[in-house]
Amino acid sequence: MISYIAIGLLSLLTLSIPVGIVLFILGIGIDQFFTPFPLLRGLGNLVWSSSNSATLIAIPFFVLLGEILVRSGVAARTYAALDKWISWLPGGLIHANIATATMFSATSGSSVATSATVATVAMPQAERLGYDPKLFSGAIAAGGTLGIMIPPSINLIVYGFLTQTSIPQLFLAGLIPGIALALAFIVVTAIICGLRPALGGETRSFPLAEMVRALVDLVPIILLFAVIIGTIYNGWATPTEAAAVGVAGAFAIALAVRGVTLRMLRESLTGTVKITSMIMLVVIGASFLNFTLSSAGLGNQLREFLGGLGLDPLGTILVVVLIYIVLGFFIETLSLMVVTIPIIVPLVVAQGFDPIWFGILMIVLIEMALITPPVGLNLYVVQGARRQGSMTEVMLGVIPYALVMLAMAGLLIAFPGLALWLPSVL
Amino acid sequence: MTAERIIDVLRRLNLGVAILVGVGLLACAAFVLTDIVLRQVGNSFGGTDEISGYVMAIATSWGMAFTLLELGHVRIDLLRTRLPGKGRAITDLASMLILTAVVTLIAWQCWPVLANSLKNGSTANTPLETPLAWVQTPWLLGWVWFSLVSWATLLAAAMLVLAGKLDRAEAAIGAFSEAETLK
């Protein structure tokens, strides 16, 4: 059965059938060939119960929040303000890319939205100020991946939904690794540009008065983050409800900067519907596949398979990491996550690992998948925002950051406390 | 009606649907927000969770067709992009046919869910006791709509391919590059 899924998955995906549909087909196949039960009869109920979910409505809310911030011009202001504060480091504006991406990660739940936001506002600057395009665009692609790690994160919501893990705990667990990654990106950039000044642009410093004035533009985003996270951990609201609060906050900010127009509203709403349905087709397909796999007794098969390999827990985790790195080259990230969760998570948990910790480790690996070619969504997003140059430049530019992520995965395995400490004390 | 016209009409209809769905989501956010505020002063509508769930199920099913026409459903186009124009058109048609078949099956399998609720007069197991048929009817219609739009799009695209208008067909059922997919 395991080989049936692996082969079926890869060949159907190669035929470029939409990912969500592939998951349904595999589920139907398992029903037909591997179980005596008429599972197909459960399909309708599964489609209903997996989409009738107050947890998942957080997805359109967080998407909408991001759309409003981008389309009302708040993103551009944030970028300009951060530029004034940290472009004195070797590497100059590159740090503003990373910092802006980090801040937007803290309000938007999606990596692609984050890097699209930063790329749109940053790219014109790079050309004007004569930056080396490689590191500059690499930093945006890598910084953008933080969107799924620093809470709120759509991917963590999906992970929590499919594995029945606490979403507030997952959010807390992602905070320290997310911030550590952002800092590591900045340090690595400063070191690289210190050694090879040609890779960065000029460092810039601004008069103190101007810096202080720029702070005003950072306030809305910080406030929004504080409100979203604060309402969750004060027990005022569930993550879903906090997302609704976030939408209202983003709307208020957009109104304050006079960024609300009828066109902007329409585009934000239809953009939200499009992304939500895209995600949901995959999620519903995965729920159905999940259901057929567990009815067909995949768990036992996997345990036997692993028992046959004779790996210890550490060996298992290393194999899992390797699987993600390899698959990450070829499979789009949300699909990668959703397809592998039903198979890998029970296996890892059976080895005694904490599902929350594994969720964070998985996110780091998924972040890497976002920037590894040939299928690395963020690479394309950043390239799409550039008006010249080849894709290869972006790919070269992300290498140092991809290595940082790999190191972070190693650190998480060595020190699980990085992820688990914060949820345990709060 | 020419194939181009069909696609055009479908796109417009679904844009309207998407705006309605978006407004519905916005209204739901406002509703949830009001409830949070009311809760702080010791009052509450109750049942916001339940209602959000229904909104999500209905929004999801009705948004599907819009996403289809916006080429928003993720496909892995590793092989597809390496094919010449004709091969790509055939891959797209085949993939569209499979999607249409599966979506039709989903819509078909969703009917018994509503039929059961109607037959038993089922209500949700919650304080609101929502009659499930009220919310499952629009939900089911969304999937039926997705299936109808898929058939129409498939036929229009097949007509375009047969007429040799490969570019037009690709614009209707092709795939954007990875980046475009999520913009």
Image (cartoon, rainbow, N blue to C red):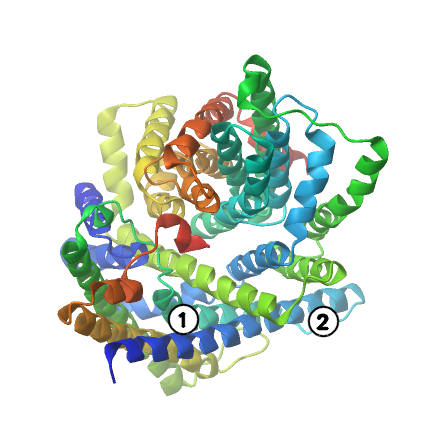
Looking at the image, which residue is at 43% across and 65% down?
A51
Q: Position of residue A200 (x, y in %)?
A: 57, 24
Q: Indicate the chain on which mark 1 is placed.
A: B
Mark 2 surroundings: few (<14), some (14-19) or many (≥20) residues within 10 A: some
Q: Which residue is mark 1?
A: B61
- Quarter of the figure with residue A337: top left
- Quarter of the figure with residue A83: top right
What SS does tag 1 mark? helix
What SS does tag 2 mark? loop
Q: Position of residue A13 (x, y in %)?
A: 24, 49
- In the figure, A426 relative to A421: above or below? below
Looking at the image, which residue is at 29% across and 43% down?
A299
Nearest the viewer among A132 and B111 is: A132
Classify residue A101 as left or right of residue A302: right
Q: What's the amino acid at mark 1?
A: Ser
- In the figure, B179 relative to B89: above or below? above
Q: What's the amino acid at mark 2?
A: Ser
Q: Position of residue B159 (x, y in %)?
A: 18, 74
